[in-house]
Image (cartoon, grey):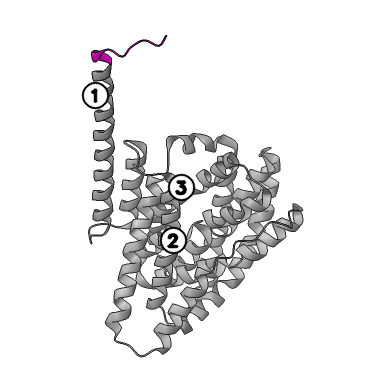
């Protein structure tokens, strides 16, 4: 026979429920307050990322991580499209052509180097390919596209995403400092950041700190680079014999081009395009906050030493080689 609940036990249960509700209400209020702050002129991409990380590693975010991940992806894509309204199409094409040689060389070089280092470090082949793909093209987007083709498990995906995210966080803060220390031009920094930083959000965040021209070039080169997701996914399906898996195509890139065409050829007051661009930059700031808030101690712990070492080695080599090439050949 089950023991009857005493008044004291019922009271303690009620207090625990009330305490839990109060804590969750506090987390929601704090989350909303930080998002509102990210909408203000005082916020910047690095600050937003730092606030998100602080929230995730202390009280934690109050919402389901899968829901916020979907919202983050949509907001990032919408913000990138909005940036297209601030770019002249002729400059977009020119910047894309300028970074094409670097993009092609570094993508193939990164994949081959990742395979070699991964084998040397005895990293799980699936994780090694995911990290190499994320480093070669555009971080989480490439990993998300290639993962299903490899039948990667949640643990393997979290290790690859965690590795790339940690390096993105470092790059967002470090790259503008390095660029200024080396007196890189806006064009040089734009191309370098687009090649050496993984995720589009961190590329845009770092370039936005460096300058408007760097932001335009970095976004264009990065989106040109992102188009390689399609052939990479097909090649992965062939190499790993997973031909039946559907391929995720980054359609938002086409909307970015459409926005740039509207900016270039549709007569409209400049203030309209400026408004879209401003909203896009605010959206990217909020995106970085959400990315930081989506991290957890568990995801950091899941990275492990060898995959992280692989990610760091690839990142350092690609960053140094691309920096040398940009400084040598781009004014």
The secondary structure type at the circle numbered 3 is: helix
The secondary structure type at the circle numbered 1 is: helix
Q: Identify whether 109 is placed above or below 221.
A: above
Which of the two residues, 223 or 276, is positioned nearer the viewer here? 276
The local crowd at label 3, few if under 14, some if 14 to 19, many if 20 or more residues have their Cα within 10 Å, is: few
User: Residue 190 occupies which quadrant of the picture?
Assistant: bottom left
| Left-right relation of 144 to 256 | right
Q: Give the residue number, with chain letter if any, for mark 3.
A: 66
Image disc number at residue 74: 2
Image x and y of residue 308, in percent = 55, 41
Image x and y of residue 44, in percent = 30, 58
Residue at 50 percent across and 44 percent down: it is 162
User: Residue 135 occupies which quadrant of the picture?
Assistant: bottom right
Is residue 80 a member of the stretch shown in magenta? no
Residue at 70 percent across and 47 percent down: it is 116
Mark 2 to mark 1: distance in Å?
A: 39 Å
Q: Give the residue number, with chain letter if any, for mark 1.
A: 15
The local crowd at label 2, few if under 14, some if 14 to 19, many if 20 or more residues have their Cα within 10 Å, is: some
User: Residue 125 occupies which quadrant of the picture?
Assistant: top right
Q: Earlier in the sequence, mark 3 or mark 1?
A: 1
């Amino acid at each position: 026979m089950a023991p009857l609940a005493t008044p004291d036990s019922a009271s303690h249960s009620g207090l625990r429920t009330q305490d839990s509700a109060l804590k969750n209400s506090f987390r929601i209020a704090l989350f909303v307050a930080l998002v509102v702050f990210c909408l203000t002129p005082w916020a910047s991409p690095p600050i937003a990322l730092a606030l998100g990380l602080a929230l995730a590693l202390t009280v934690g975010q109050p919402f389901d991580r899968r829901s916020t991940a979907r919202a983050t992806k949509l907001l990032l894509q919408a913000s990138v499209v909005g940036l297209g309204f601030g770019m002249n199409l002729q400059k977009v094409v020119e910047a894309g052509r300028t970074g094409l040689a670097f993009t092609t060389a570094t993508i193939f070089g990164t994949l081959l180097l990742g395979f070699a280092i991964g084998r040397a470090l005895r990293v799980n082949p699936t994780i090694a390919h995911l990290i190499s793909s994320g480093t070669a093209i555009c971080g989480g987007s490439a990993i998300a596209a290639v993962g299903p083709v490899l039948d990667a498990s949640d643990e393997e995906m979290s290790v690859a995403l965690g590795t790339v995210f940690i390096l993105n966080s470092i790059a967002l803060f470090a790259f503008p400092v390095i660029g200024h220390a080396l007196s890189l031009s806006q064009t040089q920094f734009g191309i370098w950041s687009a090649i050496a930083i993984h995720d589009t959000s961190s590329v845009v965040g770092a370039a936005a700190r460096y300058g408007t021209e760097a932001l335009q070039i970095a976004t264009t080169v990065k989106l040109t680079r992102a188009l390689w997701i399609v052939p990479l996914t097909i090649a992965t399906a062939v190499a790993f014999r997973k031909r039946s898996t559907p391929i995720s195509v980054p359609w938002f890139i086409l909307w970015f081009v459409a926005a740039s065409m509207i900016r270039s050829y549709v007569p409209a007051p400049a203030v309209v395009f400026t408004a879209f661009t401003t909203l896009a930059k605010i959206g990217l700031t909020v995106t970085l906050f959400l990315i930081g808030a989506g991290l957890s101690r568990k995801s950091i712990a899941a990275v492990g030493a060898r995959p992280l070492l692989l990610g760091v080695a690839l990142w350092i080599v690609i960053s140094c080689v691309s920096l040398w090439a940009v400084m040598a050949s781009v004014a």
